[in-house]
Image: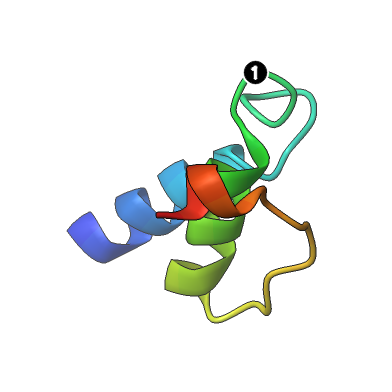
Amino acid sequence: MRIAELTLFAKAFLDPEAFGWTVTAEVRNRARRVLGIPATESVPKKAAE
């Protein structure tokens, strides 16, 4: 059950009506990575480190 909750939490970072517009592209890309979705946004090199 925790996995399902964590999945919903990660998906919220990609949803513009949840946290999608309030987090950075780096956070959205990390959410995609844990969900098995390819990163789609570029992140400045400094922020990616």
Q: Residue furthest front?
A: 46
Relative to the observer, which residue lies in front, 34 or 46?
46
Label 1 crowding class (10 Å Cα cut-off): few <14, some 14-19, many 20+?
A: few
Q: Quadrant of the N terminus?
A: bottom left
In the image, taking residue 16 as reference, residue 44 lies left or right, namely left
Q: Amino acid at mark 1?
A: Thr
Residue drawn where x is 43% and y is 70% of the image: 34
Residue drawn where x is 74% and y is 23% of the image: 21
Residue drawn where x is 49% and y is 53% of the image: 48
Residue drawn where x is 61% and y is 32% of the image: 24
Relative to the observer, which residue lies in front, 45 or 35?
45
Q: Quadrant of the C terminus?
A: bottom left
Q: Position of residue 46 (x, y in %)?
A: 52, 45
In the image, taking residue 16 as reference, residue 23 lies left or right, namely left
Q: Position of residue 4 (x, y in %)?
A: 35, 60
Q: Position of residue 16 (x, y in %)?
A: 79, 30
Q: Which residue is mark 1?
A: 22
Q: Is residue 38 above or below residue 3?
A: below
Q: Position of residue 32 (x, y in %)?
A: 58, 65
